[in-house]
Image (spheres, rainbow, N blue to C red):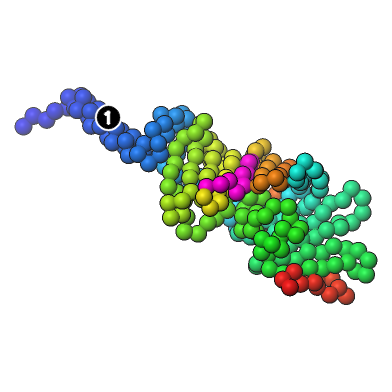
Amino acid sequence: MKFQTSSHRVFPSRILLNALWIVLGTTFLGCAGNSALLSRPPGSVFFSPDDALLALAASAPDDQTLTVIARIEFESHGERRPLKAALMMKKPASLRMESVPLLGPPDFFLSVDAGELRVFSPGDNGGRFYMGRSTVRNLNRFFPLTLPAADIIPLLMGQPPGIEAISSCLGGWEERLYHIDRCMAAERMMSLWIDPVGGHLLRVRAYAEGGAIAYTADFSDHIPVGKYILPRRLTITGGAVSLTLRYTEVRLDNDAEPFALPIPDGVAPISLDE
């Protein structure tokens, strides 16, 4: 029996390969919209929302503590208030914040850990120490954004908040960025824009009931920190309130100090839950 050499099979193989690409392309377009595949940047590795989310997860620390010096600017209804603070953060929802005044010792301390909010303001007679659940209402007494701790802390680390029972319902290319809409019960809850080259997050937009924008967070000036890529500038905007942070002295630690503020001797805690 005489066998055909590979040179006699080239044309049928190419037909089969082209047909396969057409099928795959049609499937992808059906999920992500007509322009998704056509606008895919050369050299990118995202073929699906799962690919993009895996790359995003690999670019950020899950079990390490992020410590930074932050120059913070609050803007609300045209008024601006600057602040410099040291931040210590860890996912999913642990935070410690200490002000860094121009002169003198820190004059404001805040911690969120294990669902509890603690705030210490030094002053006469030992100062005031507040304790309570880290609810949106309690956080908003000291933090300008009306967001839960489970949203605030991942955003401060340049990551999207984790939402239970959420799925990626749409993925595609938008202005050379990979765009994912995440949904719950067929309703869009959050949109992500991911850099296809570095695999890091550039924007998060969360939606309220009915599709109104709850907040938008933008991330830029990314740098390598250890094996991860982290932003040094972020802006979170919700309603009439905007929060801009610029980070320096960015580092990751495996072992960090406890997050919860200790109660100072001789100071009676004031409950925030009453």
Closer to us: 132 or 46: 132
The image shows residue 150 at horizontal and vertical percentages of 61, 58
Indicate the secondary structure of the residue bearing disc 1. Answer: helix
- What residue is rendered at 60% in x and 49% in y? 214
Residue 39's place in the image compared with 180, above or below, is above
Q: Is residue 203 left or right of residue 66?
A: left
- What residue is rendered at 11% in x and 30% in y? 3
Magenta region, main secondary structure = strand
Closer to us: 221 or 26: 26
Q: Callout 1: few (<14), some (14-19), or many (20+) C-alpha neighbours within 10 Å?
A: few
Q: Residue furthest front?
A: 210
- Dot 1 amino acid type: Asn
The image shows residue 244 at horizontal and vertical percentages of 72, 43
Q: Is residue 82 left or right of residue 67?
A: right
Closer to us: 23 or 243: 243
Residue 156 on the magenta span: no
The image shows residue 50 at horizontal and vertical percentages of 44, 47
Q: Is residue 204 left or right of residue 66?
A: left
Q: Residue furthest right?
A: 124
Report the quarter where the C terminus lies. bottom right
State whether residue 247 appears in this view: no
**Residue on which the image places disc 1:** 18
Residue 234's place in the image compared with 4, above or below, is below
Residue 140's place in the image compared with 6, above or below, is below
To which quarter of the image does residue 237 belong?
Answer: top right
The image shows residue 99 at horizontal and vertical percentages of 82, 54
Closer to us: 125 or 225: 125
- What residue is rendered at 41% in x and 29% in y? 38
